[in-house]
Image: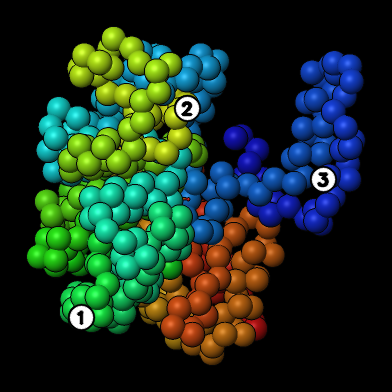
Amino acid sequence: METVADRPIQPTVQPGDIRAALPDAAPERPESFDAILSDLDEIVMPGITHWQSPGWFAYFPANTSPPSILGELVAAGLGVQGMLWSTSPAATEIEEVVADWLVDMLGLPISWKTSGPGGGVIQMSASDSTHTALVVARERAAGDASKMVVYASEQAHSSVEKGARVAGYGHVRLVPVDDQFAMRADALEAAIEIDVAAGLIPVAVVSAVGTTGTTAVDPVRAIGEIALFHDLWHHVDAAYAGTAMVCPEFRHFQDGLEFADSYTFNPHKWMFTNFDCSLFYVADRKPLIEALSILPPYLRNEASESGEVIDYRDWHVPLGRRFRALKLWFVLRSYGVEGIRHHVREHVALAAGLADRIESHPQLELIAPTPFGLVSFAHIDGIEATDTLADAINDSGWAFVTPSTIDGRRFVRVSIGQTNTTAEHVDRLWELIESVVRSP
Ligand code: PLP
């Protein structure tokens, strides 16, 4: 961690280089740990992309932090398999507690706590959470899955389409967006009416709080009201932006959650907790457990039969589960809610500052609003000039951004949220952007 800022973010290896440096078969006899560590330095490190560099502005952050690393290490050392409460009670109860803490921290409906009808569980990824939500929605709807329809915006993450495909839905409708790339509620309503008239079965809608492309925010309340009216399951994907809700000033972006059936957000993006750690909440855990619970004789035990414990194996597809809650518990306690708020506000303020500079630059323009830590902008001369800018930033070695396309327009995504990114790094990025734009 001490040296990561000085290392080139992108490796220069070619496909197959790492593999070619390794033997074809596992060693027959034990090797010394010194030999293993030496290969870590010589072979593995040259092939690492440094997501933890403070110059990381690509994709979304995939943060880690010292307490998270220590929590992960302890979990690995304990090596518990927390599929049932009885297979390691602390693994289940710490997870319940952090999930409940986060309900208050993010201003989610109180009834989503495990003490109410709902509850939260840690899954590997937001994709898993969305897939799980779509499975529960399908079970609840009953009928011919080939006629069932899932709705999401044209800007929804690909995990919605993948989850729907894996869950066996016959149709996915990508609903048009407005000029800010948010789902148009009127277009959703129209799409549902057309599908009903065609004999299809609308089953679920996914709204995004912070799309992957530009962090657009769908109208959660309006979508929730439509879902309620048509009896659709309403899943909210706040994979990246959910962390921002720790600050009350952002919660208006998720207004209307009382009409949501499920919600996902990833502490493994912006909450300083290393991958994998994705929270999945349901407003009512009964249909989730009914959809996923299968009880073979070897899993029967007194605690489960008492009905007084949570068995998280019934809350997702896998049976086995790691003690992921430990690293999140370490993080929440080490930073405190105030500490997390402080960093989120700092990242958002840095993004707003960069957006202001871009807006007042004659050759650059913002292509979308900057509600959180992502700045989306383009060179006014179009695709080639925008790509030249992105390439120059990435060729610098110390900064890394993701170019993307929306509505046929090329643009650069600068995602500010790495644990150690400060004003100094964003100023340096801006100087680089200015110098490239000055001398094409
Ligand atoms: N949803 C949104 C809005 C995302 O931005 C992402 C990833 O960036 C995902 C879902 C998928 O997250 P995961 O990698 O945890 O499956």
* Residue 340 circle label: none
Q: Quadrant of ligand 1?
A: bottom left
* Residue 18 circle label: 3
Label 3 near label 2: C-beta < 8 Å? Answer: no
Check mark 3 vs ligand 1: CB closer than 8 Å? yes or no.
Answer: no
Position of residue 46 relative to residue 383, above or below, is above
What amino acid is found at the position of numbered circle 3 in the picture? Ile
Name the residue: 51% across, 59% down.
59
> Within 10 Å of the Cα at label 2, are there few (<14), some (14-19), or many (20+) other Cα atoms?
few
Name the residue: 82% across, 32% down.
39
Regarding mark 3 in the picture, which secondary structure is present there?
A: helix
Percent position of residue 234, x then y: 22, 57
Mark earlier in primary sequence (1, 3): 3
Rounded to the nearest angstrom, the CA distance separating label 2 from label 3 is 31 Å
Percent position of residue 179, x then y: 30, 82
Q: Nearer the viewer, residue 93 or 1?
A: 93
Read off the residue under disc 1: 197
Regarding mark 1 in the picture, which secondary structure is present there?
A: helix
Q: Is residue 368 left or right of residue 15?
A: left
Q: Is residue 237 left or right of residue 189?
A: right
Is residue 351 visible from the viewing direction of this image? no
Mark earlier in primary sequence (2, 3): 3
Q: Nearer the viewer, residue 204 or 247?
A: 204
Name the residue: 59% across, 59% down.
400
